[in-house]
């Protein structure tokens, strides 16, 4: 019986390893193809189909997208939006989640019901636009942040995480005379590094990929357009649907497929650089927050 269990265990391990290798290949190979085809010509893309390394690598697609004078400015706007937006979102989410996690908070149940109601039922685009306009935020940088400051799902999971922290730690700190703010900063936050890093990554990815708020709330201030909106316009330009005055008219337009793939690479690589720094916190932060409600 012991030998049989050992054999079945080894068979399972082999199957598991093969499955993970196949799953990894299915996940990674398409992105490698996108990178390779961004350096390829239209003829090679059309004739070879799927390939990882182009026969004659070219830089025309990347030269083309960088010929836009607004691209460096948009990159700076996206970096600023991601950093400031993530900081503001985490400040609001952590403080609100910590307050909701304390059972002695007056009106706690009512606020939780309101939070859940806001997650299930949303006003929509038009009420959001009217609200932003009524607050005088149109064509401002904060119009890109405040409408999407808090994620209800992140708030609920983080609340559960804070509830899982032993209440005795807070009680002992109160006996020593610590205030709620001091308890939150010196006790709760240091114990929540994994969760904070995880949800900071979620917010950073959301802000980096965001382009709809700029499209809706910046009708006349193109100086604050983020990178994703500029790259969207570049893709539309390759299809001949927008004016190309912002690009070098002396430059011969490269194949549209190469430009689209170069745009995907340029928009994806910067945020991927962040993942290795928070990878060790990712699984722990999610699992702890989902265990206890």
Image: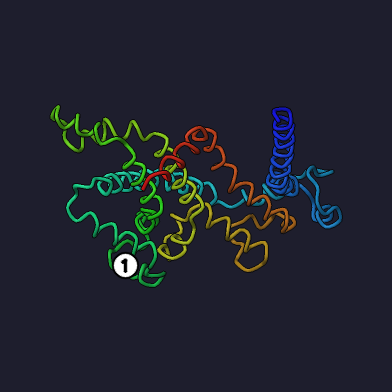
Image coordinates for residue 183, horizontal then vertical, percent:
23, 34
From what the image shows, is residue 133 above or below residue 54?
below
Q: Residue drawn at (61%, 58%), measured in percent from left and top?
A: 234
Q: Residue drawn at (63%, 52%), measured in percent from left and top?
A: 263
Image coordinates for residue 135, horizontal then vertical, percent:
27, 64
Image coordinates for residue 163, horizontal then vertical, percent:
31, 42
Outermost residue to the front: 1
Q: Secondary structure at mark 1?
A: helix
| Location of residue 126 by image quarter | bottom left
Apparent side of residue 198 relative to residue 99 in the rendered image (left or right): right
Outermost residue to the bottom: 126
| Location of residue 180 by image quarter | top left
Image coordinates for residue 204, horizontal then vertical, percent:
46, 45
Q: Tell how many labels.
A: 1
Front in this rendered view, residue 35 or 14: 14
Front in this rendered view, residue 96 or 140: 96
Apparent side of residue 174 relative to residue 129 in the rendered image (left or right): left
Residue ID for mark 1: 131
From what the image shows, is residue 274 above or below residue 259?
above
Q: Residue drawn at (47%, 51%), measured in percent from left and top?
A: 206
């Amino acid at each position: 019986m012991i030998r049989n269990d050992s054999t079945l265990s080894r068979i399972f391990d082999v199957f598991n390893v093969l499955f993970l290798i196949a799953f990894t290949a299915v996940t990674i190979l398409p992105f490698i193809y996108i990178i390779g085809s961004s350096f390829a010509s239209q003829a090679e893309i059309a004739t070879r189909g799927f390939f990882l390394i182009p026969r004659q690598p070219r830089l025309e697609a990347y030269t083309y997208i960088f010929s836009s004078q607004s691209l460096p400015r948009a990159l700076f706007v996206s970096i600023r939006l991601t950093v400031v937006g993530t900081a503001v979102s985490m400040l609001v989410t952590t403080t609100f989640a910590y307050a909701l996690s304390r059972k002695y908070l007056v009106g706690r149940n009512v606020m939780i019901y309101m939070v859940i109601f806001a997650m299930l039922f949303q006003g929509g685009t038009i009420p959001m636009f009217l609200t932003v306009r009524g607050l005088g935020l149109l064509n401002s940088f904060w119009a890109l942040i405040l409408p999407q400051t808090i994620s209800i799902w992140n708030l609920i999971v983080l609340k559960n995480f804070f509830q899982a922290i032993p209440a005795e730690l807070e009680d002992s700190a109160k006996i020593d005379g610590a205030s709620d703010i001091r308890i939150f900063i010196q006790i709760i936050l240091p114990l929540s590094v994994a969760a904070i890093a995880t949800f900071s990554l979620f917010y950073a990815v959301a802000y980096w990929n965001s382009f709809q708020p700029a499209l809706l709330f910046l009708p006349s201030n193109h100086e604050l357009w983020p990178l994703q909106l500029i790259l969207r316009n570049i893709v539309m330009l390759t299809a001949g649907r927008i004016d190309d005055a912002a690009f070098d008219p002396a430059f011969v337009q490269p194949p549209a497929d190469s430009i689209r793939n170069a745009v995907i690479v340029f928009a994806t690589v910067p945020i991927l650089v962040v993942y290795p720094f928070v990878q060790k916190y990712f699984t722990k932060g999610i699992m702890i927050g989902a265990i206890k409600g």
